[in-house]
Amino acid sequence: MATSEIRVLELLRAGDLVEAARLSAQAIGGGAIHPLFFDARGAWLQRCGQFEAALADFARAGELAPANPGAPVSMARCLMPLGRFDEAMACCDRAIAMAPRMAAAHFEKGCAAEFLGDLNLARRCHQKAVALEPRYAPPLARLAALAARHGDNAQAHALARKALAIAPDNETALIAEAEADFGDGHLQGLAGKLDDVAGRADLDANTRAHALSLKGDVLDAQDETKAAFEAYRAANHTLLAAHQPRFAGIAPGPERMAALMQEFGTIAAGRWQEHRPGPAVCAGHVFVLGFYRTGTTLLGQILAAHPAVTTLEEKPLLIDAATEFLERPGGLTRLAELSEAEADRFRELYWQRARKSEPAIAGKCVVDKQPMNSVVLPVIARLFPDAGILFAVRDPRDVVFSCFRRLLEVNPATIEMLSLERGAAFYASVMDLAARYRRVLPLRILDVPNEAISADFEGEVRRICGFLGLGWKDSLATFAQQSKSRSIATPSARQVARGINRAGIGQWRRYREQMACVLPVLEPWVRRFGYDAD
C-alpha cells in the first residue's frame, strides 16, 4: 500500500474525514486510482449533501473493488435522498448477496423499504440487523420510530431506550421517544427537547423536519397555535430547501393540471364512451381517491376489515399508463384512441404490479387506495370502466392545513404542500381537473364525506358497501384494531389506529389568522362540497 493510501486510511480511522477527503481528492487529481480515495471523497461529498457526486465516487470505488459490499451500501445511502428508492433497495440486495451477515446492508435495506411504504419488510430488515449486531443503535432507533408511528408507545419507549443506551445522541431514537411521550400525553418540556434535536448542525433535512413538525404538534396540543404554526412552517422550509433542487425542471403542480385540462378539453366527449373492461381478474375492483389528507387511508382500512376485500395501500399500480398518457405530450389524445389490444397490455401491467404487492387477489374485491388517482381518472375510465370509484371528500380548509402540518413523502406533487399558498393553489387545480373529468367521463363514482363517517359510521359504511355490492360485516366495526397489524405507510397510521373520532374536524378554525391568505382560493370548493362558509 502506497504512503498516500496509508495516510488516508489512518485519517479515516482517526475520524478526520475532512483531511482524508482532501488528500484523496488531491491524489485523484494527480491521476491516482484506488477505491479508498473514491470512498473517502464520496463520504465527504455525502456529508455535504452532494449526493449525485458522492454516488459517482462510490460507484467508481465499487468498480475498482467489485467484491467489497461497502460500496453498494454507500451508494444506497446516496440514492435514498435522491428519491431513487428502488435502486437503493437493489444496491442493498447486492451487498447482502456478497455479505449476508453485514448488518449495515440489512439496515439500509430497511430504510429503503420504509420509503417505499413496505413497513413489514422494513421491520424484518431492521430486526435482522439487530440480530446480527445487537449493539447497532440505528436499526433499534428505526424500530422505535416505526412503533411510535403506529401508536405502540410502550414498544417505542423500550426500543428507544435500548438505542440510546448504546448511542445517547441518536436523533432518531430521541425523536421516537418524544413521539411516544406525546402519544402518552406527557408534554412538559417536550417542545424544548425537540428544539435541541432540531438545532443540531449535522442533522439531515428529513430528521430536522420531523423534530420540528413534532414540536408543532406538542405546541398545538398545548393550544399555542401561533408557535405551533411557526414550527410547522420551519419544518416545511427545511424540506423545501433540501428537496426543491430535485424538482427544478418540473413545472409547478397547477401548471401541470392546467395543461391536462387544456388537452382534455380538445377531445370530443363521445371519444370517452365506455369500453370493455378486460378479463376478470378479481371479484371486484375499487379505486379510492380524492386528495391527500381527505380520509382515503381511513376508507381503505375500513374496507380492508371486510373479509371479501384486499386493500392495496398507495402502490403505484397505474404508473405505466399514467407515465405514457399523462406525462408525455398528446398522451390523453392517444389514450382516447387506444386500441383494445393496447388497453389489455396496460391492464396486464397494472395487475402484475397488484399481484406483486398482494399475490392473493383472485376471488377478492381489490381496493386500490391512492388519493392522487384523481388526476388519472381518464386512465381508469379507459382501462377499468366497470370499477367502482370512491371519491373521498373533506372540508378543503382542513385538507390544506392538514397537508401543511403533516409530513408527507416529498415528491413532485407533495412539494406543493410545503407552503399554504402553493398547497391551496394545487388543491384547487386538482379539484378543477377532477370535476372536469367527472362531467365527461363515464364513471361509476360515489362521494364519501369524511365527516359523514365520523357522524354516522355504520350508516355511511353500509351506504358504501351497498354501492360496491358488498354486504355489511360486523368486522367492519373493528377496523381500527385490525389496522394495527397492517403496514400503513401514510401519516394517518396513528390516527386510524385510534378509530373514529371528530378531533380533526374544523381544525383550520384554530389557525384562521394564518389561513386567511388561502381562504379565498378554497372558498369555491367549500361551497361546492357543502361546508359552512365560516
Image: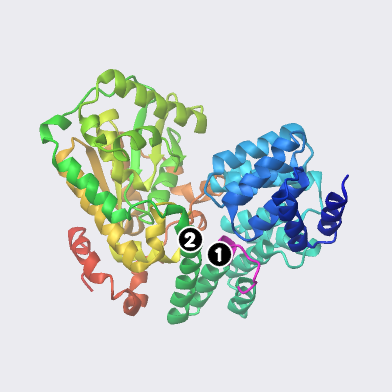
What residue is rendered at 68% in x and 62% in y?
173
What residue is rendered at 21% in x and 33% in y?
333
Q: Position of residue 422 (x, y in %)?
A: 33, 63
Magenta segment = 199-208
Picture quadrant where residue 181 is located: bottom right
Magenta stretch: residue 254 in it? no
Q: Which residue is mark 2?
A: 407
Q: Assign the C terminus to one quadrant of the image.
A: bottom left
Please tell me whether residue 416 is drawn above or below residue 488 in the rendered image. Answer: below
Left or right, residue 126 beside residue 49 = right
What residue is rendered at 66% in x and 66% in y?
177
Q: Assign the N terminus to one quadrant of the image.
A: top right
Q: Looking at the rendered structure, which numbered label has been put on residue 210?
A: 1
Magenta stretch: residue 202 in it? yes
Picture quadrant where residue 19 is located: bottom right
Please tell me whether residue 311 is drawn above or below residue 406 in the rendered image. Answer: above
Indicate the amino acid at tag 2: Leu
Q: Are marks 2 and 1 in contact (CB under 8 Å)?
A: yes
Q: Nearer the viewer, residue 459 or 71?
A: 71
Q: Is residue 184 visible?
A: yes
Q: Is residue 408 visible?
A: no
